[in-house]
Amino acid sequence: MASEPSVVGQFPPELLAVICAHVYAAGIPPPTPSLDPLICVDQPGIPTALPSSFPPAYWPESVVRRTLANLCQVNKAWYEAAKPWLWRKIEIRLPRSWLAIVDEVAGGDDEEASEEQAALMVGQTLRNAETAALAAQNLIGECSSDDAALELHDKVLERLSGPDISIPPELLSPPASREPSPRRPRTKSKSPARWKLMRSISVAVQDVMERAHPGIYVPPPHDPHPGRFVRHLDFNHFRTIGMRRLVEEGVNNRFVTGDRLAAVLKELPNLLVFGATEYMDGALTFPVLKELLLRGSASRGRGRPSRGRDVVIPDPNDPEQEDLARRRECKDLEAIDLTGCVSGVFVSALSQFVNTFLLGHSEDSSDSEDERERRPNRGRNMVQEESLTFPGMRRLGLRGVKSLQPRILEPLVLAFPHLTHLDLSCTRITPEGLAALGASATVRLQSLALERCNWLTGESIRNFLIEAPAAQNLRELSLYGDWTFPSPLTEEQLRDILSLAPCFKSGQLVYLDLSSAPLNRELLLEVCPQQPRLRSLGLSHIRNLELGAVADFLRTKASNVEILTLVTATQELGYGDLVVSHRQATIALHTQLIRPLCTPPFVFSLSSKPKTEDPPTRLRVIELAPPLLTSLGAGAGTWRIVRSKGGRGWYVDAASGWAAQVSTDSDGTAEEEGKGSKLRRDLEPNHPYRVEIEALADANGNVSSGVGWHARKMEILHGDGLLGREAGLYGAVAFAYQG
């Protein structure tokens, strides 16, 4: 018996696209995270509410990509629906995969071969567009002939040869009897982007047909290249370690070069997110930075004359003007993460970019001393009159970019007037730069990291948090310091911040790290306002802080804190003036912190079954120093030690996690309710989340870089901030590195 046709095969293309969109969206982390590592098990189920540790709130990236790849293999309709979502996010992991991306998106890195491919592509696209146009003529009752096709071809070529079309004449393959168009005398340059060629041909054909038959619609030619689908490109997982390459090969035969990266970026008009790492920062050259930053509204703002000046007509034959016109049609970049980029090539390129486009001058050692003295004044005047800004940028990550001087770093940060996430940890930001950022009338930060910025003063941080409009809506704040680079705040400055800063007074903070700040019992219990939304709190490297004061603060003012860091902190744990043995420290940890805050109160009743009450707080993860973790042994009760891939470690309650609420039937069996999730303290020994935490504890540090709690690095690419979760090199910086 023949099988009946599938109903899914009869779905319209729009419905298939919606299905694929939902598959892609299933891999996006939710706005309310569980703060736990992603649990990957077979058939995990569907979360009933957020946050949710188990079932996981989103799919792993590998599952999403495998699902979309399988949909592409069903039939042509599913292929067309799933392909845009499969290419939407590109994470470069292996060198050979990067070379494959270069070939697929940019046509390879051979310039001559690329121009030949572009010429063939233009010819094929012209034929397809003209065929579609002739078919449209047939629909309205006009017969098409060879003469009509030749006439249409000549008109389209004439339209494409105009001065306002960015297709070089050599790519149009004109007939041998026709001389190249004299309207565009130009030197040989790289061919335009493929998406730009396709759009120009479509516009030209539509314009020719519109003139002959007003109102006629000609479908655009099919573009097989996937560059226009890409929204996300990052090198977070890129490595060349372990390839058995010689040092000379690694220096002279790099995989990710500036030319290859610039060629790929030129083919990504809809790119919104870009992430780089120290493994490929040598490819961040000046042309690459121009392709990244001078997009969309930033390019549309360039070249506009100031009021009262003469109108400047750009030269259409200038290759730089062609690139500028192409970049105007690209979308603005929304997020860029440059964590750890410190190479000389990158620093030199970024310095050249800032000097050229933001300060209005370029450095030249041959200039006289008088010219160098006058040049900063001209730069400041130019910034005041024609300052270049990037209004589309929302998230900027510069963590660990230590090689940038303040004169380059600060103008760059100030050029982004609408930032919501900013990570300046371990940079040379100065008090003057922070004050200039605070004076911005448009910046409204939601997440800010100023970890180990040893050039900042306590007074500058105080003034910024109290007076700056940019800091009024902060929900995540990291002022982390350690014994090497302690917090510059004094007790009085910290008192002013806790009592006067709008972000503290509003009670909207969800992440706070005050490690190495001069906190004491009075500041915590009497000065600091209530923090009902706080979920992750860092109090490491505070020697003289009392453990009892921390417990009282969590119980009375921040009962929703789930994660607490106490690395080399508090007197009772052995880091104060008094000598405390490891045994005494572990006993103090359990008796003064864990038992009072994490154990439900005891209830006894003779008449009926006592109602179980929740513990006073939600505390379930405590970060401790490695020696103290070692003294804890295998843990006590349901508490286990989970170590990161690096030097950090946590004391975790394996029986606590966000899961579906459980109701008990009349026969005593427990069933999950569909009403929502809650932080359960009684997960069964065979519960998948508890089993996974036990497995992480048994791994003894042999885990992925994305395992950990209380991230030190801000998640920039997706906008999850300091509560976000990352893997790869970004994950190692966030959860593994101790310093």
Image (cartoon, rainbow, N blue to C red):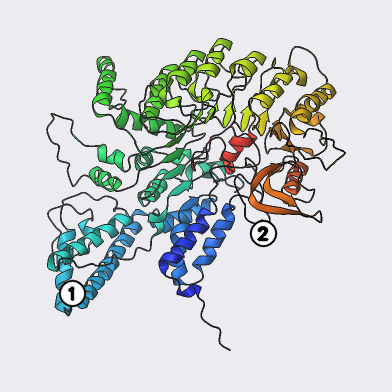
Is the C terminus in the top left, top right, bottom left or bottom right quadrant? top right
Q: Residue drawn 51% across and 71% down?
A: 74
Image mark count:
2
Residue matched to label 1: 149
Tell me the kind of residue under disc 1: Ala
Whether label 2 touches label 1, CB < 8 Å = no
Q: Position of residue 711 (x, y in %)?
A: 60, 34
**Relative depth, front residue between 613 and 414:** 613
Q: Position of residue 586 (x, y in %)?
A: 81, 26
196 relative to 177, above or below: above
Judge from the rendering whether residue 157 lies leftward or rightward of residue 623; answer left or right.
Answer: left
**Relative depth, front residue between 622 and 625:** 622
Residue at the right extreme of this rendering = 606
The tag on residue 523 is none
| N-terminal-most mark, 2 or 1 | 2
Q: Position of residue 104 (x, y in %)?
A: 43, 58
95 relative to 634, above or below: below
Residue matched to label 2: 43
Examine the image and state in which quarter residue 417 appears: top left
Q: Nearer the viewer, mark 2 or mark 1?
A: 2
Judge from the rendering whether residue 362 lies leftward or rightward of residue 104; answer left or right.
Answer: left
- Dot 2 lies on which element? loop
Q: Residue drawn 51% across and 49% down?
A: 92
Inter-mark Cα distance, 2 to 1:
58 Å
Tell me the kind of residue under disc 2: Gln
Is the N terminus in the top left, top right, bottom left or bottom right quadrant? bottom right
472 relative to 194, above or below: above
Residue at the top extreme of this rendering = 492
Q: Residue drawn 74% across and 17% down?
A: 571
Judge from the rendering whether residue 598 lies leftward or rightward of residue 94; answer left or right.
Answer: right
